[in-house]
Image (cartoon, rainbow, N blue to C red):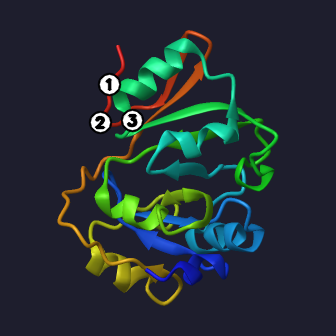
Amino acid sequence: MEKSIIQKGEVIGFQTDTVWGLGCLPKDIDAINKIYEIKNRDRSKPLILMSHDVKYLEKYVSGISTYAKLLMDKFFPGALTLIFKRSEFCPCDICAGFDTVGIRVPNSKNFKDVTTQVEGCVLATTSLNISNEPPCKDYKEACEKFGDRVKIIKPKYKEDLQNLASTVAVCVGDEIKILRQGSVEIN
């Protein structure tokens, strides 16, 4: 992938460890608006931030408890999205009016290839699909359905998708609330 593609405000499609994703730079308001338009996504639904390493995500959130750090150590990289209070650094445009933001570190070499080539190594993301429809299953389907609207990044490595979205959990202090059960089970 050319570094300039996403720097120029493009929205990209990419493979992760769970489902295909759609993303852009977190501070690019025009590209964020494109994501909502492409997906026909309700503006009340936030995007999440993803990187190949949690160190790039930490500045976007505040209030990471000891328990949350334990969860991140155990499940990052992996199919867990944790929601925290957003920091002042986090752009409000991705948060849909909430004072929180979700972060995730996919366990995917293909995703790591993408984020190591973008400024700040972080993408504002969501699944690659029209809202309320299933996410794309593979590169061919991603190109057929979205190739005319976004740059689809061809995976370099053969990786199997779980085809199950990540588990989403709100983590405040030592309390956790599961919002969506995915493949990661937290006891």
Q: Which mark is residue 122?
A: none
Distance from label 3 to label 2 (Cα)?
13 Å
Residue 15: x, y in percent? 35, 64
Q: Tell me whether circle 1 and circle 2 mark residues in contact (CB < 8 Å).
A: yes
Q: Nearer the viewer, residue 184 or 51?
A: 51
Q: Residue at x 66, y 82 (%)?
A: 8
Residue 70: x, y in percent? 44, 18
98 in relation to 153, above or below: above
Q: Residue at x 40, y 26 (%)?
A: 73
Residue 110: x, y in percent? 32, 63
Residue at image mark 3: 76
> Helix, strand or loop at disc 1?
loop
Q: Amino acid at mark 2?
A: Ser
Q: Residue at x 58, y 83 (%)?
A: 4
Residue at image mark 2: 183
Q: Nearer the viewer, residue 92 or 1?
A: 1
Check the picture and name the quadrant holding the N terminus.
bottom left
> Helix, strand or loop at disc 3?
loop
> Considering only order in the chain, which callout, 1 or 3, is on the residue closer to the N terminus?
3
Residue 177 seen in render: yes
> Helix, strand or loop at disc 2?
loop
Residue 128 seen in render: no
Residue at image mark 1: 185
> Considering only order in the chain, which callout, 2 or 3, is on the residue closer to the N terminus?
3
